Image (tube, rainbow, N blue to C red):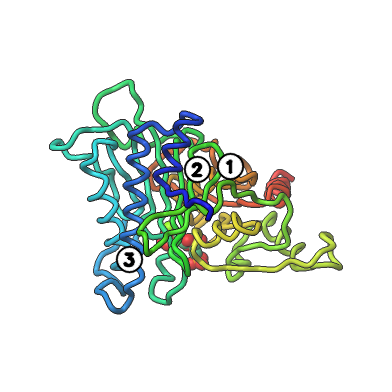
Amino acid sequence: MTQKISLTRYLVEQQRDHGHIPSQLRLLLEVVARCCKTISHAVNKGDLGDVMGTATSENVQGEVQKKLDIIANDVLIEANEWGGHLAAMASEEMEGIHVVPNRYPQGEYLLLFDPLDGSSNIDINVSIGTIFSVLKKPEDHAGVSEKDFLQKGTAQVAAGYCVYGPQTTLVLTVGDGVAMFTLDREQGSFILTNESLRIPEDTKEFAINMSNMRHWDEPVKRYIDECLAGKTGARKKDFNMRWVASMVAEVHRILSRGGVFLYPWDKREPEKPGKLRLMYEANPMAWLVEQAGGTATNGKQRILDIQPKALHERVSVILGAKNEVDRVTSYHAG
Ligand code: AHM
Ligand code: MG
């Protein structure tokens, strides 16, 4: 029988072989994985638990929060406060940062997350997920502030997501490829199911919210028009389209079988650079995609090179198959 490799064993062996998962980072990743298990259980309860529906609050983006948004956020905050591995946390669901309380030791890492991405899918039993990004707190001063979080995506030391779908799957990078773990519910642990995910450079599958077509900018319109023209058009091949409305599920499909995903800037809210958030949605996903051989840009620039100016900053996102992303990006340059 092939031996099952648990997440813990994977992290220990990665440290032994390559030395890029120090013990505090390993603790952090194990705590996040444990949170994902707890969130997965809550999601699975559905109408049988008091988890469905809308809460009475709004988040900092002015979006109505779902009960599960709040539950997932609380799970991540509570589990990560006391371990001594973190200095502070930031979340899509909180306006400011959450500094580790004085009664606990302060660690050297910063954790950012979207506790439950794809909230509009919660009540209809479609895949949703948790996205996370880990940074190191700058060492040149004591204490921690929001400014310490404003680091480029290239500074991430770990990033990943957990998708709550037909299976619960954790996908992780620490800068040495992308590994995938599937939750074994009987054992209660994440088991390595793919140690090196790769995104083919070409694809015939794109993902974009087509209902926004009339708001798009010219380069995006040109790219999608060419895909839709199929075999007889400029691309000389037929394309397929998918839109789950959960970025986690979209990126998971791309890491599993290829494709390209776009949530571009559009004219609905021209003063905002896009819908998705740079620091806890785009950056972790961009790093995962690059680590799997894909590309991620905002149409003009590599996402990981963008200097964040604010915690909840938004960004235009084009990611996935290298040749497709390069093509859309070149249309913007033209
Ligand atoms: P959320 O973080 O509030 O769930 O919003 C992000 C989600 C992404 O997962 C997804 O790509 C997008 O919003 C879906 O947007 P749309 O409603 O245009 O389909
Ligand atoms: Mg989100």
Instruction: Residue under label 1, please give it.
Output: 291
- Give whichever of discs 1 and 2 has the lower sequence position: 2
Residue 51 visible here: yes
Percent x, y of residue 84: 24, 36
Q: Is mark 3 within 8 Å of ligand 1?
A: no
Quadrant in which ligand 2 is drawn? bottom left
Q: In this rendering, is residue 35 above or below 240?
A: above
Answer few, some or many: residues within 10 Å of disc 3's Cα (few below 14, many 20 plus, some between 14 and 19): some
Answer few, some or many: residues within 10 Å of disc 1's Cα (few below 14, many 20 plus, some between 14 and 19): many
Image marks 1 and 3: residues in contact by CB distance under 8 Å:
no
How far apart are labels 1 and 3 at the CA level?
A: 29 Å
Residue at figure coordinates x 48%, y 56% from the top left: 275
Q: In this rendering, is residue 296 above or below 266?
A: above
Q: Amino acid at mark 2?
A: Thr
Horizontal side of residue 122 vs 272, given as left or right: left
Instruction: Residue under label 3, please give it.
Output: 41
- Give whichever of discs 1 and 3 has the lower sequence position: 3
- Give whichever of discs 2 and 3 has the lower sequence position: 3
Image marks 2 and 3: residues in contact by CB distance under 8 Å:
no
- The residue tagged with tag 3: helix, strand or loop? helix
Horizontal side of residue 323 vs 100, given as left or right: right
Q: Residue furthest front?
A: 1
Instruction: Residue under label 2, please give it.
Output: 173
Camera-side residue of 273 and 29: 29
Q: Residue furthest left?
A: 103
Percent x, y of residue 78: 22, 50
Residue at figure coordinates x 47%, y 52% from the top left: 4
How far apart are labels 2 and 3 at the CA level?
A: 24 Å
Discs 1/3, front: 3
Image marks 1 and 2: residues in contact by CB distance under 8 Å:
yes
Residue at figure coordinates x 46%, y 72% from the top left: 126
